[in-house]
Amino acid sequence: MKKDKLEREIELLEDDDSLTISEKSKMIRELERDYRDAAEESAREAYDNEYNSW
C-alpha cells in the first residue's frame, strides 16, 4: 500500500460519521500497522534479492 493511499483511507475513516471515535481509532491503527508491515516485508524482499544476486 502506498503512503498516499494510506492517507486517503485514513481520511475516509475520519469522515465516516457512522463510526464511533473508538472504532475509527482502531481501524486507523490497523491500517497503519498493515502499511508498516508491508513496507518492512518489501524492504526485506529487496534486501534478499540484492543479497542473492551477488
Image: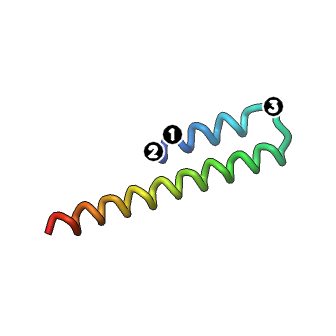
Report the front residue among 46 and 9. 46
The answer to whether 40 appears left or right of 12 in the picture is left
Q: Distance between the Cα atoms at labels 3 and 1?
A: 20 Å
Write down the residue under mark 3: 17
Residue type highlighted by circle 1: Lys
Q: Label 1: state its secondary structure.
A: helix
Few, some or many C-alpha atoms within 10 Å of disc 2 (few <14, some 14-19, many ≥20)?
A: few
Q: Which residue ends up furthest to the front in the rendered image?
A: 52
**Where residue 11 appears, x then y in whole percent?**
64, 38
**Above or below — where is 19 with respect to 38?**
above
Which amino acid type is marked by label 2? Lys
- The quadrant in which residue 19 appears is top right
Residue 52: image location, x then y, percent: 21, 66
Q: Earlier in the sequence, mark 3 or mark 2?
A: 2
Q: Which quadrant is home to the C terminus?
A: bottom left
Q: Residue furthest left?
A: 54
Task: Using residue 16 as the reference point, say whether residue 2 is left or right of it.
Answer: left
Q: Nearer the viewer, mark 3 or mark 2?
A: 2
What number of labels is visible?
3
Cβ atoms at labels 2 and 1 below 8 Å apart: yes
Sort mark 1 into few (<14), some (14-19) or many (20+) by Cα contacts within 10 Å.
few
Vertical side of 14 occupied by 52: above or below: below
Spatial CA span between label 2 and label 1: 5 Å
Q: Residue at x 64, y 42 (%)?
A: 10
- Alpha carbons under labels 3 and 2: distance apart: 25 Å
Q: Which residue is mark 1?
A: 5
